[in-house]
Image (cartoon, coloured by chain):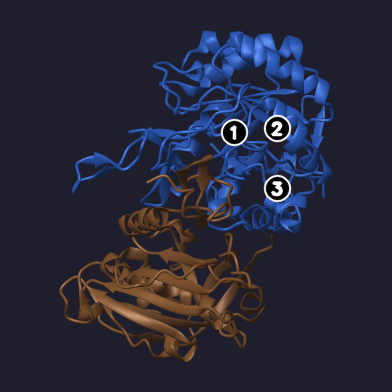
Chain colours: A blue, B brown
Amino acid sequence: MNIAVKIGKSVFPNPVTVASGTFGHSEELYSLKEVRCLGAIVPKTVTLKAQEGNPPRRICETPAGMINAIGIENPGIDVFIAKKLPGLKKTGVPVIVSISAHSENDFALMAQKLNAAGKIAAIELNLSCPNLKKKVLVAQDAAATASVVRRIKRISKYPVIAKLSPNVTDIAAIALAAEASGADAVSMVNTFAAMSIDVKRRCSRIGNFTGGLSGPAIRPIAVRMVCETAAKIKIPIIGMGGITNANDALEFLIAGASMVAVGTYNFINPKAPLEVLIGIMAYMKENRMTDIRELIGSIKR
Amino acid sequence: MHQIQTTAKVIANQKVNDAYYLLTLSAPALAKMVKPGQFIHIRVNEGFEPFFRRPFSVYRAKKGQVQIFFEAVGRGSKLLARKKKNDTLDVLGPLGQPFTMPGKGVQQIVFVAGGIGVAPFMVFSDILKKHKARKMLLYGGRARAHTFSMAEFKKNGVEAFVATDDGSVGVKGRVSELFKNIEVAPFTLIYACGPKPMIAAVASFAKERGLKGEASMEEVMACGLGACLGCSILTTQGYKTVCHDGPVFALDEVIF
């Protein structure tokens, strides 16, 4: 059974990964056999300089999901490369490094630093984190998305993945812009801008006032977005949004995603990615599929 | 640090008073690993309601069993209160940093507990049974309905003092009232667990008297593993996660 997936020149042994920000820098989990079974590890987004993150409270529970406004707390790319990356590489699992920046120049500097770091499977551009205090996100603007992708493609020796925000009118249009600028794949979707109010105190439940909604609550919207986008672009899609089990992941694959990421549900069931992989293989066997490509985009219209 | 995810069978779920329950789980591997101050992260329900696991301090861990002492106060804990013998629960643990063991030179150990925050001090006093220090528990509860027998603590050689907000049991007032009655011997260590204002009061008391100690903090938690960075609190060293850097922090480390 061939379940390997190719993005640019990188090959991933299987289609199951984790969404950035849901596995930490995963140093605590390296020993788990679950980690070694992943198709790729995507550690938490790093920025050029260290960021301390948002004031508490940073998360709240919502129906079948959660809102978060962590604020990309991270040690900065230099510390990440020196202290976190070696351990991640040691797992033997391909590493997709997620980066975010306030300017194109910062994105470019980080891409150069990653070139020097060596042996990375891909770079994911987090263009869509809704938690930093900016009015319009890069991922909400097709021209800005195209510009960042084009710049990083010129610099990076690794495949470049653009992570898209669902907080747009037409996500396929942004995906097309990324593709036209040379992106090797898109990952979709990031969290939905959201808030929850404590009516007793008449306060937001989130220190940052608003945050991003994730978890099973958003899954049907994410599946629809993947399906619409897959019909329009040729590059692979990494699909995510509320995946909890193999059935959920199969929805994304059938809709047209080439890889799937377990995100928020890692917090509830750390074994979920492994269960997803086992379930996908069982489904393929049951349906007499020998290649994952028979499954990807197999939706009947 | 290593943790396990296991399916634990409910041995008993005993109602202790109007608010508190003592849940006994069969979890042999976990029971061997737990250290005082650590917690277990329980999925109280299958499906997505409630969505998060719920963290509970370990009350006791021995003979293949793990006990938690909890208050049925929110959605998660109310569901947990309904669990019956032979039900099973998905449990992740043990998680977090334990209390620091007091050295041999420590002469007095004071546990300060607000309400259900008393939980970790039982397993701690089990382990400290042979420690020569004078051991005290200062327990504050809202009312008689939130008090329980101190016999188990007394068996561990712990002197227990109780305060209630309404004076229905013990001294009337907050647990901080009980501080006034303790004579501070040299080499006293304080361990606190309870509501944040109580811990803040303990921290300022400790600072006034020049005492060292630790506090077990609480925060809304998602992963419990230090991955999501959702439960961070402000400390003298910046934001730290309650689940992984804590829940035990030095008393003078937490910024209230």
B61 versus A38 height, above or below: below
Residue B57 appears at what percent x and percent y? 48, 69
Instruction: Determine crowd level at label 1: few under 14, some 14-19, many 20+ residues with C-alpha closer than 10 A.
Output: many
N-terminal label among 2 and 3: 3
Q: Which residue is mark 3?
A: A27
> Residue drawn at (34%, 88%), measured in percent from left and top?
B149
Judging from the image, mark 3 belongs to the subunit labelled A
> Residue drawn at (39%, 35%), measured in percent from left and top?
A211
Disc 3 marks which amino acid? Glu
N-terminal label among 2 and 1: 1
Q: CA distance from mark 2 to mark 1?
A: 8 Å
Q: CA distance from mark 3 to mark 1?
A: 14 Å
Q: CA distance from mark 2 to mark 3?
A: 12 Å
Of residues A63 and B16, the one drawn nearer to the viewer in this rendering: B16
Q: Is residue B67 visible?
A: no
What is the secondary structure assignment of the residue under circle 3? helix
A301 versus B98 height, above or below: above
Q: Quarter of the image holding residue B184?
A: bottom left
Q: Residues at badges 2 and 1 in contact (C-beta under 8 Å)? A: yes
Residue lying furthest front: B186
Q: Which mark is residue B256?
A: none
Of residues B105 and B87, the one drawn nearer to the viewer in this rendering: B105
Badge 2 and badge 1 in a common chain: yes
Q: Which residue is mark 1?
A: A74
Q: Which residue is mark 2?
A: A80
What is the secondary structure assignment of the residue under circle 1? loop
Judging from the image, mark 1 belongs to the subunit labelled A
